[in-house]
């Protein structure tokens, strides 16, 4: 069984709206895909090492990722060195501005882990709209399909 780790932070609920939409198409796949949906403060090294792919979901805070997501990276980065190379990942970002600071920062850190970005990030600027939810659902479907057929 493939294991998907979802690490998230949310203060206003916008990121959770994206995450709920992302997870919706994954629910029927529970027999083939194990999903660990954990807040960034609850996720730890063991969760990361057990994952076959990771989703990072965060609001943009002051042009950066949420501090709790950064803390997850801080707690796992050095202990995971050389153990998660090639891990497929994607990002979901809710932003009040352009969101690029959060995306760029997470990409830099993911590069240090040696992870592979397999799908483009979803960036929802402002309120989460129906098209953002649709995009999140499509990303969920594509990530799951890629995992289950061994593409990543």
Image (tube, helix red, strand yellow):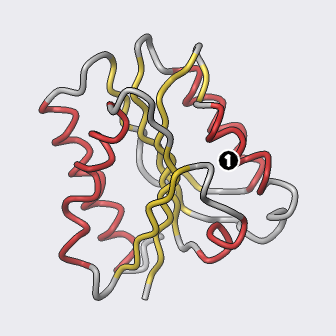
Residue 105 shown left or right of residue 118 in the figure: right
Say which of 111 and 30 sits in front: 30
Picture coordinates of residue 132, whole percent (x, y): 22, 33
Picture coordinates of residue 45, whole percent (x, y): 72, 66
Picture coordinates of residue 25, whole percent (x, y): 19, 63
Say which of 145 and 136 sits in front: 136
Query: In the image, what residue occupies the spot 24% across and 61% down?
Result: 141
Residue 128 shown left or right of residue 86 in the figure: left
Which quarter of the figure has residue 88? bottom right
- Under circle 1, the secondary element is helix
Picture coordinates of residue 37, whole percent (x, y): 44, 61
Say which of 145 and 31 sits in front: 31
Q: Residues within 10 Å of mark 1 (few under 14, many from 20)?
A: many
Query: In the image, what residue occupies the spot 43% across and 10% down?
Result: 97
Q: How many labels does the image show?
A: 1
Q: Is 122 above or below relative to 151?
A: above
Query: In the image, what residue occupies the spot 62% across and 77% down?
Result: 50
Residue 54 shown left or right of residue 43 in the figure: left
Q: Name the residue under label 1.
A: 110
Which quarter of the figure has residue 24? bottom left
Q: Is 11 above or below relative to 79?
A: above
Instruction: Specify the quadrant that holds the N terminus.
Output: bottom left
């Amino acid at each position: 069984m493939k294991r998907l780790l979802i690490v998230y932070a949310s203060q206003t609920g916008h990121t959770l709206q994206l995450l709920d939409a992302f997870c919706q198409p994954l629910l029927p796949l529970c027999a083939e895909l194990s999903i660990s949906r954990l807040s960034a403060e609850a996720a730890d090294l063991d969760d990361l090492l057990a994952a076959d792919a990771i989703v990072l979901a965060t609001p943009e805070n002051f042009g950066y990722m949420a501090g709790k997501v950064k803390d997850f990276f801080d707690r796992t980065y050095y202990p995971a060195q050389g153990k998660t190379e090639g891990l497929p990942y994607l990002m979901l970002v809710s932003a009040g501005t352009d969101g690029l600071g959060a995306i760029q920062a997470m990409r830099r850190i993911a590069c240090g882990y040696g992870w592979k970005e397999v799908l483009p990030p979803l960036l929802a600027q402002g309120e989460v709209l129906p098209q953002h939810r649709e995009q999140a659902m499509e990303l969920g479907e594509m990530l799951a399909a890629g995992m289950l057929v061994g593409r990543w």
